[in-house]
Image: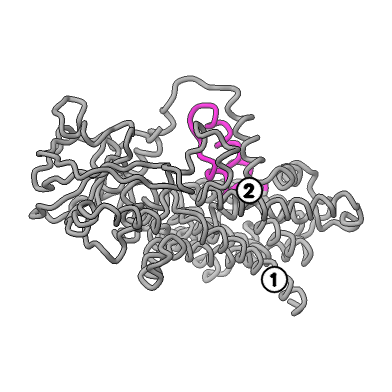
């Protein structure tokens, strides 16, 4: 690769990293990030709702956080910030193999500018960070070793290892692997040649790296699969408006010009020549279309999260780059202007959105009824607010167990108390997610505990003290400690209520339905 090409590619990736670093330094931790924080503190072979990889990212971020106590949220995100850069480089190299150097640079640029992709894969602590990295590694491998080509035993084993690592990232990866298996089976039937040795080595490599996922689920009653399969039964019937509305929301989150480009790249005719471009086009469509179809259909039946289509859009980036890399495309003035405006708008809007979440700079424009961004608690601001209430601060510092009524909340307090508390964090609710597995690590002799919740929440802490058939937990006396108002730009956005309790007196009133969807 010529140095000029490499230098431009590194510049594109570096500018994208600079943008994400700026946003990461501003943006408070999200609900998912505050929950995944505990993955890193409770490393296991797998987890209730995700495979192993995001726990490794969280553990690395937690280690960095001990070196950066003033920036706990940024430290938690650093592994994803850096792994996204590597994912871009691998994706660009795969794109270069299929569609040329110009397309490689454009694929990296699109990955740096598509908000949905860089937020989920390279900014927030989410399972998508390791997922896009391993997807890029898979594409890099397939650009050099075509799916249906003959492979040496070593290449077959390495291919299986890559597929196994991909399986440890997110369950979406299983659909990618199933698609590859189906394509290989069809090719085998067409050629009437059964490649037993090659298949056995790929399978061996896959099992050699994916075994933590299967062993953990086997030991825990296949909880992950029961939970995720149960989500498809969350609603009855099919809403026909669901798929088009979900697709429109995806285009908006990708940024409209980038989203439309990705769709056009998917729908445009394949190259007429029988070369690497044709091979890459077929492979990328083969992998992306099942993802798109599955989640568009599911959006008519259930709530489909915005991040669930990240793998599909990531797989289409090389195709979109190939469209833009065609000769003569950039001679069009309107396209050059659209590209510049899109890049400027993404940077400006992303920074403004992050600043609003942190400081509420657009509070006058966003109706309070729809603006829930103030519920995301900045660790340093929360710490300052807690210190203004000596009794609560002292109770938190002395607590052996700190719990809440929602699995998303303890992480905010854990980040705020980092370096000040040795308490174990837990959750007491019908839906505790991974806290159910981590609860055994609580000290059974612990006597000092603090419960907290958002004031006005759908399950007030005070309700936990009452007996009732609808209460999953039984507590002893709860002693009110007070309330803490968390402010943003001088306006109270969240009020937290705190109670002391005796953890040794907590008992479960009824079994938890582990397959219950979160809604």
Q: Which colour scheme is used?
A: one colour
Q: Which residue is drawn at 64% across and 69% down?
A: 14
Q: Tell me, yes or no, if residue 499 can be seen here.
A: yes
Mark 2 lies on residue: 313
Assign a secondary structure to mark 1.
helix
Identify the residue at the far top of this view. 237
Q: Please identify the dominant SS of the magenta region.
A: helix
Instruction: State the quadrant of the C terminus.
Output: top left
Q: Which residue is drawn at 73% across and 42% down?
A: 260
Res 493 quadrant in image: top left
Bounds of the magenta span? 285-313
For the residue carrying disc 2, how many other residues have a C-alpha within 10 Å: few (<14), some (14-19), or many (20+)? many
485 sits left or right of 474 in the view: right
Mark 1 lies on residue: 11
Q: Horizontal and vertical percent for residue 120?
A: 53, 52
423 sits left or right of 227 in the view: left
For this rendering, which residue is in front, 124 or 240? 124
Q: Residue at x 36, y 53 (%)?
A: 382
Res 97 quadrant in image: bottom right
Q: In this view, does 79 lie above or below 223?
A: below
Q: Horizontal and vertical percent for residue 407?
A: 32, 44
Q: Do the residues labelled 2 and 1 touch (CB within 8 Å)?
A: no
């Amino acid at each position: 690769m010529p140095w000029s090409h490499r230098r431009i590619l590194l510049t594109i990736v570096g500018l994208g990293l600079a943008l994400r670093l700026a946003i990461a330094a501003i943006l408070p931790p999200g609900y998912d990030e505050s929950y995944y924080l505990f993955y890193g503190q409770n490393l296991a072979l797998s987890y209730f709702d995700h495979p192993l990889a995001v726990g490794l990212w969280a553990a690395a971020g937690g280690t960095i956080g001990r070196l950066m106590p003033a920036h706990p949220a940024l430290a938690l995100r650093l592994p994803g910030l850096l792994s996204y850069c590597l994912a871009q480089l691998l994706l660009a190299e795969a794109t270069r193999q299929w569609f040329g150097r110009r397309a490689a640079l454009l694929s990296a640029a699109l990955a740096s500018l598509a908000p949905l992709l860089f937020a989920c894969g390279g900014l927030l602590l989410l399972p998508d960070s390791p997922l896009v990295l391993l997807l890029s590694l898979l594409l890099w491998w397939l650009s050099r070793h075509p799916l249906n080509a003959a492979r040496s035993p070593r290449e077959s084993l390495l291919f299986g290892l890559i597929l196994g690592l991909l399986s440890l990232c997110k369950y979406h990866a299983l659909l990618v692997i199933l698609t590859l298996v189906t394509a290989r089976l069809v090719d085998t039937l067409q050629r009437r040649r059964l490649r037993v040795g090659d298949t056995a080595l790929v399978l061996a490599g896959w099992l050699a790296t994916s075994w933590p996922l299967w062993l953990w689920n086997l030991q825990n009653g296949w909880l992950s699969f029961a939970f995720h399969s149960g989500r498809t039964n969350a609603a009855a019937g099919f809403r026909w408006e669901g798929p088009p509305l979900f697709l429109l929301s995806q285009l908006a989150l990708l940024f409209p010009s980038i989203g439309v480009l990705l769709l056009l790249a998917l729908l445009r005719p394949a190259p007429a020549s029988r070369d690497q471009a044709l091979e890459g086009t077929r492979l990328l469509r083969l992998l992306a279309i099942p993802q798109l179809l599955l989640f568009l259909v599911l959006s008519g039946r259930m709530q489909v999260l915005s991040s669930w289509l990240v793998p599909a859009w990531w797989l289409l980036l090389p195709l979109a780059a190939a469209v833009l890399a065609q000769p003569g495309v950039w001679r069009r003035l309107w396209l050059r202007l659209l590209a510049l405006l899109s890049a400027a708008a993404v940077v400006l809007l992303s920074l403004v959105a992050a600043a609003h979440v942190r400081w509420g700079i657009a509070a006058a424009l966003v109706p309070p009824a729809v603006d829930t961004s103030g519920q995301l608690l900045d660790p340093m601001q929360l710490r300052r607010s807690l210190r203004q209430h000596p009794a609560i601060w002292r109770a938190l510092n002395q607590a052996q167990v700190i719990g809440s009524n929602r699995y998303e909340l303890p992480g905010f307090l854990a980040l705020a108390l980092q370096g000040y508390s040795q308490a174990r964090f837990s959750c007491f609710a019908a839906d505790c997610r991974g806290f159910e597995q981590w609860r055994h690590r609580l000290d059974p002799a612990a006597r000092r505990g603090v419960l907290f919740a958002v004031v006005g929440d759908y399950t007030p802490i005070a309700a936990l003290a009452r007996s009732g058939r609808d209460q999953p937990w039984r507590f002893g006396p709860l002693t009110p400690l007070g309330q803490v108002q968390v402010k943003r730009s001088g306006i109270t956005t969240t009020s937290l209520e705190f109670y002391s309790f005796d953890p040794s007196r907590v008992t479960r009133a009824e079994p938890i339905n582990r397959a219950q969807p979160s809604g």
